[in-house]
Image: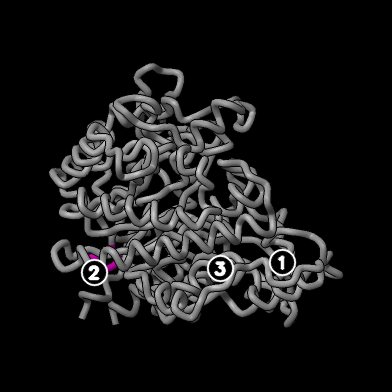
Amino acid sequence: MEYLYILCFLASCYATLNNKKFPDDFMFGTATSSYQIEGAWNEDGKGENIWDRLLHTNPNFTVNGDNGDITCNSYHKYKEDVALVKDLNVTHYRFSLAWARLLPNGHVDQINDAGVQYYKNLIRELRANNIEPLVTIYHWDLPQGLQDEGGWTSSDIVDRYADYARLCFRLFGGDVRYWMTFNEPKEFCWQGYGEGTNAPGIKAAGTGEYLCAHHVLKAHATAWHIYDEEFRSTQNGQVGIVLDTNWYEPATNSTEDKIASDTKLQFIFGWYANPIFRGDYPEVMRNNIQRRSLAQGLTKSRLPEFTPEEIEYVKGTADFLGVNMYSSALVAPIENPDVNAMGYEADSEVRDWLSENWKKGASPWLVVTPWGVQKLLRWIKEQYNNPRIIITENGYSDYDGTLDDVDRIDYIQQYLSGVRDAMDEDGVDVFGYTVWSLLDNLEWVYGFTNKFGLYHVDFNSPNRTRTAKKSVGFYQNIIRTRCLVDYCIDIQNYW
């Protein structure tokens, strides 16, 4: 009776927050990426990457002309950053390797020993502090030399990436258990080769993003097979990929809007997940793009085709799935869609928008919709046979980097509650959660104006001084207690 009373009392007090403990082996961590924090853009033999080239030749591409030349200066301050990670008491730290720091021209015929040593030192420092390194092989920063050869729209990039991935496994795999082949390929394919709003800034909507994605998927699968055949038996690690999406909420309860929701998710998440987990692109993508391509006077679809052999080669190439999720949007079908409009958004024939009632972060795309994370995780489970999932990015941005970041605390707490709900109520296999980001950093085209960090960085200081925000103590407490509220029910150990 006493247990039931406590259960009912807690349920009434925390109706919107899950009050069950996270499992003892649940992984809590934080994340960064190389271009956003390292700086040292041309030091110790590092080559030029596509963001270096773009922002040096077109400084107006970012807010205030900000770039990654110095940013957080983590190349020189990695030990200080690892100390911050240790102070958080997280289980893991997700970071990315800079391809051009390891291979200045992108090819394995020229290996930069200083770059190799930097990442060995970083990994060693993490291991010495009992922090699990989660390594992203590619996080948007292609060597400029490879872009000059065609970048992600050239079929040769698959072999270049395979060479690079094999080198990474060989150099660092003895101390790395979790590998992520790509971070958010939808973003760098769509914005980099479709809309031209990210590096390398190519505008080829309706063809460029699809060709990029096709090569990314083949490169990912090739890297997975290389690890599986050459390294898994001795290194005992896992290889996954990181995909991003919003949750897309039907604008109404109509059948049409529900179909629009699924269609949008297929065009954004299924574009990459479907070939890996089910084989081939989603049917709605193939049908829509084929129909629209023919209506545009083309003789075949703008969406590249996998051969039957390639479908089998790509299928099943993920030991786990990284999910980056921040926001939601409302969706409905486009009425009378323009058949001549180009781009994956036009091809979906679905429109999306943000509700004016939703709280907004500094980033224009970020709205606070914690209810969306459970819906998304449930959808992924149903679509892909409940894969093992780690939330590889989730976080809140503000403009001023305030130390009293109560909005960030509220955001993390509510989203983690949604994750725990998905695990508890829907049986979704989530094994970890990663806050974006450890540090305020260069948020791509938004420069230093969008601040996601648990730690404030003073970009006006030559020392790039780091200062803990209030969210640090909050996150430490969650990790210590495994609990989102003051009093949690430990179901796994209660009986």
Judging depth in this view, the residue of 274 and 206 nearest the camera is 206
Magenta-colored segment: predominant secondary structure: loop
Residue depicted at x 29% and y 53%: 134
Residues rendered magenta in the picture: 22-26
| Numbered disc 2: secondary structure | helix
| Numbered disc 1: secondary structure | helix
Q: How many dots with numbers?
A: 3
**Left or right: residue 315 compared with residue 252:** left
The image position of residue 471, as x and y in percent, is 39, 43
Q: CA distance from mark 1 to mark 2?
A: 38 Å
Image quarter hosting the C terminus: bottom left
Amino acid type, label 3: Trp
| Numbered disc 3: secondary structure | helix
Residue depicted at x 42% and y 55%: 182
Mark 1, residues whose alpha carbon is within 10 Å: few (<14), some, or many (≥20)? many
Label 3 sits on residue: 271
Q: Earlier in the sequence, mark 1 or mark 2?
A: 2
**Left or right: residue 349 compared with residue 39:** right
Amino acid type, label 2: Glu
Label for residue 229?
2
Amino acid type, label 1: Asp
Label for residue 381?
none
* Residue 441 higher or lower than 298, as above or below: above
Label 1 sits on residue: 347
**Left or right: residue 354 compared with residue 440:** right
The stretch drawn in magenta includes residue 235:
no
**Residues at marks 1 and 2 touching, judged by CB atoms closer than 8 Å:** no
Q: Nearer the viewer, mark 3 or mark 2?
A: 2
- Residue 233 picture quarter: bottom left
